[in-house]
Image (tube, rainbow, N blue to C red):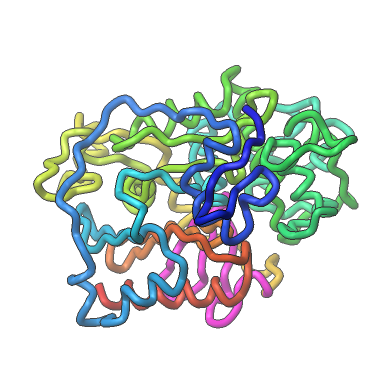
Amino acid sequence: MTAASHPASGEDRATLDNWQEPPYNRWAFSHLSEIVPTATVSRHAARPPGALARLEALGVAIPDLESRLEATYTDAFLVLRGDQVVAEWYRAGFERHDRHLVMSVSKSLCALVVGSLVDEGRVHTAAPVTRYVPELAGSVYDGPTVQQVLDMVIHVDYDENYVDPRSQVQTHDRSAGWRTRRDGDPANDYEFLKTLRGDGSTGVFQYCSANTDVLAWVIEQVTGNRYVDELSSRLWAKLGADRDATITVDPAGFGFANGGVSCTARDLARIGRLMLDGGVVRGGRGADASRDAVGSRVADASRDAAGAADSVRVVSRAWVDAIMAGGDPAVMDQDYFPGEFRTGSYKNQWWHMGNERGNVSAIGIHGQHLWLDPPTDSVIVKLSTWPEPDSDEWHLTQSRLLLEVCEAL
């Protein structure tokens, strides 16, 4: 695939060099496969879409909801309570069946695949990373455990500055095929990960996208399969998804686990439903579309324990419960959680907001959210194209809006 230009809006054109920047990202986030090579994450069966729900169910409590969605660059918004879609909205030009780049929400999906291997006893979180990936000997990952990678408590010489061409995250992007390569760049993501160094310390949180790609490499080494294939067989194929997901791949065919997944809002909501159901997909692929159900569940949870035929276990309840309980707030730099979320934490590649509701979220730059609200048994998906990749403004604006939605439910 070449780095040919593509129309973004009017005479603007999206390229490999500018697609993450406004205004080009507005077009590129839903057409990424036309810029960056992608691989298909296959599903085994499709579910016909139900009747479209609008915003009326939330309109009384939040009368300005639609204008706030527009003001926060929303492309897709969906609220699932229990099995039912209670609100759904898409911007003009973006449809229910369209896939959207979810950025670092991809990290949380990777963690579910890791969890399934932990459940099988094939990955031990207390083991050093190099037990599974000896190629990382001599790197910053020579010594830290799988759990420390999952929780991102490793010091890495890695600048996660998305707009600085000199940063390691941009070198990472170039190695993975997300930007035009420069002379001296590693040939692919595997080679990039080998170059990373640090001061050897652990125990303090540092957000580092490279960690997730290390986990994907562990998955490949343990299973002997491509990460994209394990993401399909262990997660996507069990959801009863409406559409295949996609994931970008580097020149070596390695899936960009930390940020390369694209999928529909409804299918992402199924991940949230899986989490609130303790790691089980209930109802399988036989949900009644007339009920506008995203993932129909059996009423009696005990049936799952008995091995109900209409339930599919994806990952253990223990793995999900650990995520829902959150990590240790003491290891966090409080700048990661502005405002009322200062007691938040990070566990197994998921964010715990640290509030009384126990909200847990998968978050991606430019405004991607998969938000779980245990008190109302609800999932909220908000896919966006904020102009800035990361800022306190959009984190607080979006989080407060999602909290209002939870309270309205």
Nearer to me, 311 or 397 = 397
Is 108 placed above or below 128 here?
A: below
Q: Is residue 208 magenta?
A: no
Q: Residue at x 50, y 27 (%)?
A: 230
Nearer to me, 194 or 283 = 194
Q: Is residue 218 visible?
A: no
Q: Residue 344: where, in percent of width, then height?
A: 57, 70
Q: Is residue 16 visible?
A: yes
Is 342 placed above or below 111 here?
A: below
Q: Residue 63: where, in percent of width, then height?
A: 26, 82
Q: Residue 90: where, in percent of width, then height?
A: 32, 59
User: Which quadrant of the figure has residue 37?
Assistant: top right
Q: Residue farthest to the front?
A: 11
Q: Is residue 338 magenta?
A: yes
Q: Residue at x 60, y 61 (%)?
A: 22
Is 404 placed above or below 383 here?
A: below
Q: Which residues are magenta?
A: 335-362
Q: Residue at x 70, y 27 (%)?
A: 132
In the displayed structure image, the side of residue 200 where residue 128 appears, left or right: left
- Location of the C terminus by quadrant is bottom left
Number of callouts = 0
Q: Residue 89: where, in percent of width, then height?
A: 29, 61
- Location of the N terminus by quadrant is top right
Q: Residue farthest to the left?
A: 290
Is 366 placed above or below 8 here?
A: below
User: Which quadrant of the figure has residue 338?
Assistant: bottom right
Q: Residue at x 20, y 43 (%)?
A: 49
In the displayed structure image, the side of residue 7 where residue 265 appears, left or right: left
